[in-house]
Image (cartoon, rainbow, N blue to C red):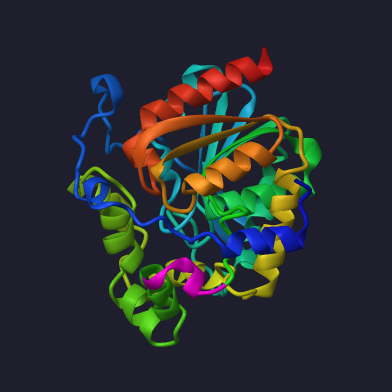
């Protein structure tokens, strides 16, 4: 079907922002192993590099040699999210680059508002410094919205893209709080209400302590893993970036600039012929099956890989399937 801003908005109005996990999924905790008994490690075996960017710093992993593979995370994570996937890429002869977005991970926390536009400005400046060509994007959550925007504006620098649990049409933009379902609608309304959102996130560290371990991952994170995710946000003020992200989600046309960016990303996604790979799980969160089905029918040059049962942070439940699938796809895409 032809893609327009009107059809994207119409499509997103019929889909919830987050899929509600069934009790059978959400109450079941898988063991601390991936497929074939491979361990899911809490270790972060990389030394980060620091770049000076716009008066602050961006910390990033830069491992291996070969064609560049750029990993972009979302809220409330960092390059730590990719720790069990990066080794597959480097072992296969690729260079893995995984920045911590500004205000997150080990990157600096400048006095900015942490809007989508702020993140895009810092990411653009960082990637301009690296001057990468022939990039493969591997993107998740807000990293997907930022990454697709970057490839839209730099089409000569990107050769292919893998994505999972992404902020893309028709799942987003969302027409209204009501379209998100009663529970999710109420939660995001509270997060975007002055005072309530600050109490939930700045005081309660809501995304790290609640969303990440209880609603986004099937297995139980170890204390070492939780400590790694807590480390960038030890104080209320340090958590401000994680509060702004839910306020940037395009709901009912607000914020207008993010709504426009996500719609433009959707137009690119359904019009670009670069190879694309979608990892998805059941029931998913941002990308439940109706979204996956729509993308399969409307996005050219798209392969899909089903990971099994999963919610939002698929890298924590299925890192080995993602790593193996990514390398297999890279090898075939460049053959």
User: What residue is drawn where x is 25% and y is 50%?
Assistant: 26
**Above or below — where is 41 with respect to 74?**
above
Near-viewer residue (118 or 15): 15
**Above or below — where is 85 with respect to 1?**
above
Q: Position of residue 237 (x, y in %)?
A: 39, 75
User: What residue is drawn where x is 68% and y is 41%?
Assistant: 298
* Quarter of the image that includes the C terminus: top right
Residue occupying the far bottom of the picture: 195
Question: In the displayed structure, does residue 285 sit left or right of residue 150?
Answer: left
Question: In the displayed structure, does residue 288 sit left or right of residue 264?
Answer: left
For the question of whether residue 260 can be seen, the reply is yes
**Above or below — where is 253 with respect to 294?**
below
For the question of whether residue 99 can be seen, the reply is no
Residue occupying the far top of the picture: 335
Q: Which residues are magenta?
A: 176-182
Q: Position of residue 257 (x, y in %)?
A: 70, 70
Near-viewer residue (296 or 86): 296
Q: Position of residue 136 (x, y in %)?
A: 64, 32
Near-viewer residue (79 or 146): 146
Q: Is residue 309 rendered magenta in the image?
A: no
User: What residue is drawn where x is 71% and y is 34%?
Assistant: 300
Q: Quadrant of residue 161?
A: top right
**Above or below — where is 303 with respect to 229?**
above
Q: Is residue 179 rendered magenta in the image?
A: yes
């Amino acid at each position: 079907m032809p893609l327009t801003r009107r059809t994207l908005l119409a499509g997103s109005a019929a889909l919830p922002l987050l899929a509600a996990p069934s009790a059978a999924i959400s109450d079941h905790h898988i063991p601390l192993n991936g497929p074939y008994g491979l361990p899911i490690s809490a270790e972060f075996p990389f030394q980060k590099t620091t770049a000076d960017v716009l008066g602050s710093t961006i910390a990033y992993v830069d491992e291996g040699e070969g064609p560049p593979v750029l990993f972009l995370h979302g809220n409330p994570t960092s390059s730590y999210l990719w720790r069990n996937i990066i080794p597959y890429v480097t072992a296969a002869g690729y260079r893995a680059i995984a920045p911590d977005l500004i205000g997150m991970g080990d990157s600096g926390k400048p006095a900015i508002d942490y809007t989508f536009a702020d993140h895009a400005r810092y990411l653009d400046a960082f990637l301009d410094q690296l001057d990468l060509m022939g990039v493969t994007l591997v993107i998740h959550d807000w990293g997907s919205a930022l990454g697709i925007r970057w490839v839209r504006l730099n089409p000569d620098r990107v050769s292919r893209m893998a994505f999972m649990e992404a902020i893309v049409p028709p799942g987003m933009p969302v027409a209204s709080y009501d379209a998100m379902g009663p529970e999710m609608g109420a939660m995001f309304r509270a997060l975007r209400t002055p005072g309530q959102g600050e109490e939930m996130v700045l005081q309660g560290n809501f995304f790290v302590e609640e969303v990440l371990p209880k609603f986004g991952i099937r297995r139980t994170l170890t204390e070492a893993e939780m400590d790694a995710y807590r480390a960038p946000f030890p104080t209320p003020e340090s958590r401000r970036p994680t509060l702004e992200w839910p306020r940037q989600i395009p709901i009912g046309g607000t914020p207008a600039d993010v709504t426009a960016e996500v719609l433009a990303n959707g137009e690119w996604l359904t019009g670009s012929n670069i190879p694309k790979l979608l990892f998805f799980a059941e029931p998913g969160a941002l990308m439940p099956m109706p979204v996956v089905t729509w993308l399969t029918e409307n996005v050219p040059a798209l392969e899909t890989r089903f990971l099994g049962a999963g919610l939002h942070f698929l890298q924590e439940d299925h890192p080995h399937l993602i790593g193996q699938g990514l390398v297999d796809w890279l090898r075939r895409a460049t053959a």
